[in-house]
Structure formats: C-alpha cells, structure tokens
Image (cartoon, rainbow, N blue to C red):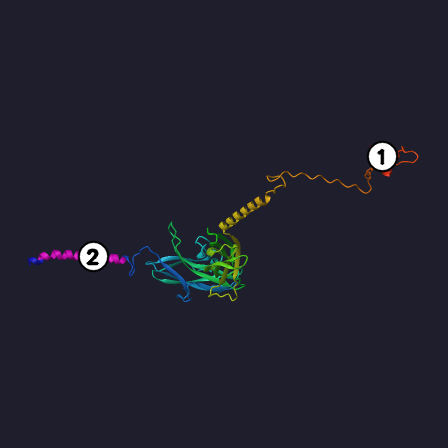
Amino acid sequence: MKSARTSQPYLRLASLFATAFAVVAALLLAGAPAGAEPDDGNRAWSVRPATADGLPDKRTHYTLQGALGGKVEEHVLITNSSKVRASFVVYGTDAFNTDTGAFDLLPAATKPTDIGSWMKFPSQTVDIDAGASISVPFLIDVPETATPGDHAGGVVVSLATNGTDVKLDTRVAVRLYLRIAGLLRPTLEAQKVLATYNGVGNPIGKGGVDVTYTVVNTGNIRLSSHARITVTSAIFGTRLGGEARKDLAELLPGQRVTYTAHVDGVFPAGPIDANVELEPYPDPAQPVGQQIATTKTSVTIWAVPWLLTLVIVAVLIGLAVLIGLRFGRPRPGKGKGKGGDPKKPTPPTPPRPSAGGPKRPARTVRDMPSVSKSPASKSAVSKPTVGAADKAGASAGAAK
C-alpha cells in the first residue's frame, strides 16, 4: 500500500505534460492549412497558348490570321509553379528586333502603339493557387486603319508587386504574330555596304576584306534570310574569295540589323567588288504564296599591293632620271657646254628688193684705152669710147 501511494504524484505529473503537448500541437496545426508548404520566397510561373476549353496545345507561339475591322479570340494558359498562392499581371505589348536581331518586347513602362494596344483581357490581375493553372481568354480587336501584313507582339505575364517600394519587372511572355489580309510585300535589302581591304607585306601575297552591311526589312511581312558574301574582280568579274553562307535572324517589318563579315585569301587585283547577296524566305507556318526575289548589293574598293607599288614607282623614277641625264647632255661642238665652243650666231639674210623698187646700179666696166696709129699723124692718141655703162657709172659717182 505504501508503494502505491508513492507512485500517484508521478502519474499526475505525466498526465499534465501530455495534456500540455496536445494543446501546443493543436495550436500549431490550427495555424497552418492542410497540405500547404512553407513559403520559400521564390515565385515561378509559365505561359503558353491554350485551347478554348482551357487545355494546353502543341503551339509554342501564336500564328494568327485577321482582317481589317475584324476580331480574333484566343486563350493563354498561366501556371503558378510557386509553393504559395500568387497574383500575376497579364497584358499585351509590341515586339521589335534588338541590335543582334533577337526578338524582344517593349518594356512594361513603354506604351504599345500597334498590336499590343489591340489586345483586351477580362482583368489585368489574375490570382492563382500554388501549382494551379488558369486559362485566360483575350480578344484582338483589329482597327480599320491597320496596315496589311504582319504585326508582331506578345502576351506578357509578370508578378504583381503592389504595396512595395521596389518593383522588379520579372516577366514571362509568349510571342504572337497576326497577319492582316491585303497586299503583301516580301522584300529584304542590304544597305550601307562598306568594305576595306587589309593587305600583307608580301608583294604577291593575299589579304582580307572586311565587310559591314545593314539588312533592312522594307516590306510588310516578317522574313528570315541566307546571306552570301563574295569578293570579285571589278574588271573581269572573276571570284577572288567568299564567306560561307550565313543564316540571319528573322526580321520584322521596318526593322534593321547590322552585320559584319570577313573574307580571307583575297588577291590584290586593283579594283574589286564586295557583294552582299540575300535570299529571303518566310515562316513555313505562314507562307506568302509568291516568289521572293533575291537581292544583291555591291561596293567597289581598291586592293593594291602597296609594297609592290612603291617598288614600281621607285623604278620608274630611276628610269626617268637616267633618261633625263642621257638625253639632256649637249653634244660636243654644239651649244654651250663642256665639249665645245659657243656656237656663233648666223647673220640674218637681207630681204630681197621688190620688183617695183629701184634697181641696183650696174657695175662700171672700164676698158683699157686702145691706141691706134693714123697714117696722118703717128703721135695722135685716140680717146677711149665711153659706153652706156660708163655713163651710168659716172652718173652714180656724181650722185654720191
């Protein structure tokens, strides 16, 4: 009996501990929902096209057809992969190409002006339970003033951050293409083609050509393309080198992207042409139904082996100097130089008298006096006969 009375206090103490533990456990279980996991602070979600009954389909993006003034109905499936319930913002916006040609969407703070402004959602905010998915319908209302061709944008779903000072634009989107019926113009051009030739020190060696070109979508539908860069002789048209065919990114209407290329092993053939050839092609999911022309743009540059040119110029200058020294030296006895006396000037030839001028007086001819003996007088001396010439000479002497 004594031992029984001693064990009663221990039994009461154990009962009190068991009751307290049960109460604490009940309070803890009452504060947490059944099946819920603690919030780890991470938020994850996904977006994809959906069918009208809210189920996901095989599409990775929207490829739609529309008409001016028409309406297009679609659904987007949003899945909350977080461990807790979360709120998301859903809206539409416009697309553009980055500097590298990648597809991108306007920032949240930029208001769309094209297809993004045509999208209408029932509500801007959607609350989704942890691990659940919701199909959200939306409507594309095409205005009457829209232009025919392709219009690109996206359906964006971002995490709602209302009530906080810091807003981080973390978003997931699915791209959307809408083609409006009308006249389609599938054109792609290479503009602002620039080229430079980089020679080598070897006079007969080969260099490289660096080419920069800008691809512009001048049409109204989105196009991808293959680019071929070749270098040919501007005189003979022979191929001097080329780069392997490059696949360029899809370019939206009105967008442009600048690319660079390098062609090695080009012989410096004087004037050469750097050619950029584009082969555009449409998305197989949206065929154009017409032949798309291949475009080619060229620019002419000079590829000169400068070392060989300098050698040729130096040789020509040397030949010119030797020729000048050889033929510029005066010959002996002619002209004024080391090999001869100064050349005497030739007296000028007097002009001949004209036919009607005064005649030059004739030269006086004087005959020796002839002595004749007369039978009458041997001492008589005959006088010389003065002719006409003597008279003319006498007249000339008198005139002097």
Amino acid type at circle 2 is Phe
Q: Residues within 10 Å of mark 1 (few under 14, many from 20)?
A: few
Seen at 44% across and 57% down, the residue is 104
Is residue 253 among what the camera can see?
no
Residue 154: give x, y in percent of width and height.
44, 59
Cα distance, mark 2 to mark 1?
182 Å
- Disc sitting over residue 369 in the figure: none
Indicate which disc, 2 or 1, sits on the residue closer to the N terminus. Answer: 2
Q: Is residue 292 above or below residue 42?
A: below
Disc 1 secondary structure class: helix
Q: State the residue in front, 114 or 329.
A: 329
Residue 24: give x, y in percent of width and height.
23, 56
Give left or right: position of 317 versus 10: right
Q: Is residue 334 above or below residue 120?
A: above
Q: State the residue in front, 176 or 292.
A: 292
Write down the residue under mark 1: 394
Write down the residue under mark 2: 21
Seen at 16% across and 57% down, the residue is 15
Q: State the residue in front, 385 or 125.
A: 385
Residue 289: give x, y in percent of width and height.
51, 67
**Which range of residues does the magenta coloring cover?**
5-30
Q: How many marks?
A: 2
Residue 328: give x, y in percent of width and height.
59, 43
Give left or right: position of 358 versus 82: right
Magenta span: predominant SS is helix
Give left or right: position of 50 versus 70: left
Q: State the residue in front, 196 or 179.
A: 196
Quarter in which the C terminus is drawn: top right
